[in-house]
Amino acid sequence: MARPEYLRNYTFDWDIFDVAVSGKSALDTKFLTAPVLDADQVTSFLRGYGLDPNDPVSRAELFGNFQESMQFIKRYFLKEGTSDGLDLSIPSALYMVTDVRDLFLMAAGNSESTHEEKLWAEIILKIMHTILHVDKDLRSSYFNAIQTQIFDRYYRYLHRDSDNNLYLKSGEIKIPLIDFETKAKKTRDSVIIKLLHKAENVAEELFDRVGIRLVTKTKFDCLRVVKFLIENNVVIPHNIKPSRSLNTIIDLTKFRQKYKNVIKMSLRNDLTEDRFLAAVNRELAECGFDDVESDRNDHSSKRYRSIQFTSRQLIRYKNPFLKDFMEIRKEAKADEESPISKKILAMDTSLIARDVRFFYPYEIQIVDQDSHTENTQGEASHQEYKRAQKISAMNRVFGKLLAYKGLN
């Protein structure tokens, strides 16, 4: 029986539907886009994406992303670039691509390429998609200003005494610290790897590009640091992202009642501050966690201990161009009759942003010295964490190719 022609109008790509309405990532679909049959459909898709392959600048950018994706794959996912990479090689047909639209047709199975080449084309397109999102994150232009404004809020409360001991201090309140660390800016490659393993495959969803760690002497001091940051308006609770908060150091449900009892005892027995703190620390010893499963990060060790949360800070960026331009306008007014002065004075400055304001997320981690020592050893170490992240990204992107070649 012949298939009715009208059914073409009622065909659904359920894979893409899952991306749109069911929370699936485009990286986990059979193909990165809806099926494309010819170069015109690819052109239409890319224009909708925001890049016109008929525009020379966009075409060059797309081809540059294609070349970078190939190099990225070799450097991080194949044995030729890393010892724990896959023992595979990019097919020679991929090196022959000169128009990115051909890569889309190859991935869609609408070219003369083999099935393995089709799978490789899909992999490369997924890397390209991720690189484009990293490069188009507008806020990255303001990163130095972001870091400075966030860190300055903390630096004003950091003090060292004559013996070089570090404290968080405001007025009479002084909390001893073992260390205060700021996270270095993530390299571009590490951002790409992180995005490749995240369900939210967009650069705006990275919350730890800026990070701060405070290492305290005791677990109780971890709670005191949180209290200090809130009371001094370094952190505004209303700007904390709830789904990003995690505490694996102190079981607060257990501790609250025990702490209440210590307060009552201190009032009843007129305890000195030293005896009060000793009693609190004894109770805290019974308020820890066993191994904790984190829904937030599959690659964190179950033994990793910290209090961490993500806050947003309002960043103010003054446009340096505007100041320079207004100086030029001032000089132009001194010679209003010259042609160049007339053009400068006629320019509409209302479209030049005087300053830019936006909220930027950053991660705060608070940990006691014993937990910090354990966190930095063995499988909880940062190197092991990064390796697990890379392997996860590799398995995600190469999953179909590995299954096809029987290498799962």
Image: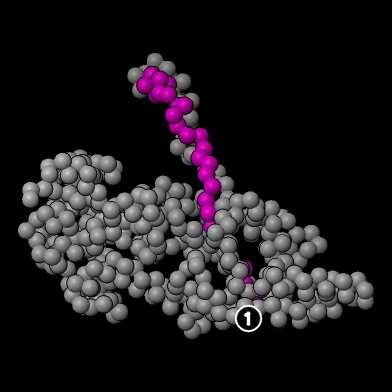
Specify whether residue 131 is in view.
no
Check residue 356 for magenta coloring: yes
Q: Is residue 77 left or right of residue 88?
A: right
Locate the C terminus by quadrant.
bottom left
Residue at x-position 44% and y-position 72%: 299
Residue 165, percent across and down? Answer: 70, 73
Q: Nearer the viewer, residue 84 or 155?
A: 84
Vertical comparison of 7 with 28: above or below: above
Check residue 138 for magenta coloring: no
Q: Is residue 96 left or right of residue 294?
A: left
- Over which residues does the magenta segment extend? 341-368
Q: Nearer the viewer, residue 265 or 306?
A: 265
Q: Is residue 324 left or right of residue 276?
A: left
Residue 189, percent across and down? Answer: 35, 63
Residue at x-position 51% and y-position 70%: 294
Q: Is residue 287 left or right of residue 374?
A: right
Q: Residue furthest bottom?
A: 378
* Amino acid type, label 1: Asp
Residue at x-position 34% and y-position 68%: 393
For label 1, count other residues whose C-alpha is less than 10 Å away and answer few (under 14), some (14-19) or many (20+). Answer: some
Which residue matches tag 1? 370
Residue at disc 1, secondary structure:
helix
Specify whether residue 71 is in view.
yes
Q: Nearer the viewer, residue 395 or 364?
A: 395
Residue at x-position 60% and y-position 51%: 239
Quarter-wise, where is residue 400 in the image? bottom left
Quarter-wise, where is residue 203 in the image? bottom left
Q: How is the image coloured?
A: one colour
Residue 287, percent across and down? Answer: 69, 77
